[in-house]
Image (tube, grey):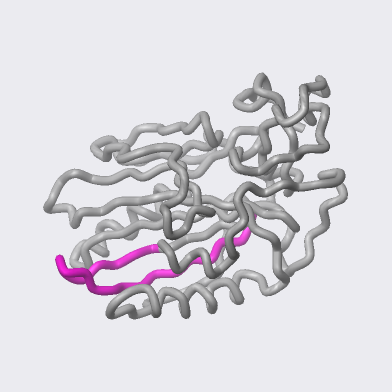
Amino acid sequence: MSFWKTLFGRKTPTIIHGSPASEKAIGSFHEPAPTAKPSDIASPPSSRDYFNKEWNFGLTIPADWKIEFENRDGDPGAPEWMQPLRISCAKANHGHPYLSILARPTKEDGKGVRGYMDKAESDLRRGFYGFALDAKRETELLGYPVAWMTYGYRLDSGPRKEINATAFFGHGMMLAFQFIGETDADRVDTNFPLFERIIRSLRVGPSGIRHPSVYLPESRVCELCQKAFPERTAHSMLNLKLGRFIAVCASCRNSETSI
């Protein structure tokens, strides 16, 4: 993962000063569509619902997949990318697939998704032996832009294929929310559609996605219930409706309260 740190630089923790409402978008990302509700997403056969209370998001995942880990800090090579989740299929004849989620705050740079993908492709070519890009395109997730890339490379165990889908939630100070799905190359036809189905099932609680290394030191009141809280006790949530980080108290963090 060390090549990802060149995309945004190293900045952990992130401290956002000033009034959150005054944060302005500076790039070409567009306004979000209404957030999808969990009930809008049909569960595929043999699936189960997963919810991460620490980050306040949910997915529909295959029933026979296992959770490898949750809520980890970043790898030593890329500490700015925190790791909310990794899931995998233990069945060897399924192509050893796994899907990871990584997240980090980042400042909008005005280059948009295309600029991000061009730089990512260059970094990936340097980071992977036998790298070959299959496709890259801009799509959407929950009304926000996504850089969607598919490519292959070689490991000692053989050729692998990967989906790399990075959603950019918010404006100005954004949350890059990245899905990486990896599989043996001969199982692409089975596992790529499965990865996409899991990614498209993303649902977020009304308060937003929490990031534990973002601080809003000047916030004194929960933006959902309007109750005051002591300094540095706020949870920072990227609210999809507002498109920015908001300060939320512990009681409202996983509640159904919305703005």
Left or right: 227 in relation to 102: right
Q: Is residue 85 above or below residue 130?
A: above
Q: Let me know if residue 47 is in the magenta part.
A: no
Image quadrant containing the N terminus:
bottom left
- x then y, percent, for residue 11: 62, 56
Q: Is residue 130 above or below residue 143?
A: below
- x then y, percent, for residue 237: 67, 38
Q: Let me know if residue 158 is in the magenta part.
A: yes
Q: Nearer the viewer, residue 5 or 37?
A: 5
Left or right: 252 in relation to 218: left
- x then y, percent, for residue 117: 53, 73
Residue drawn at the location 66% of the way across and 71% of the way down = 112
Residue drawn at the location 59% of the way across and 64% of the way down = 9
Q: Which residues are magenta?
A: 144-163
Image quadrant containing the C terminus:
top right
- x then y, percent, for residue 101: 44, 49
Left or right: 131 in relation to 85: left
Residue 43 makes an appearance in the image: no
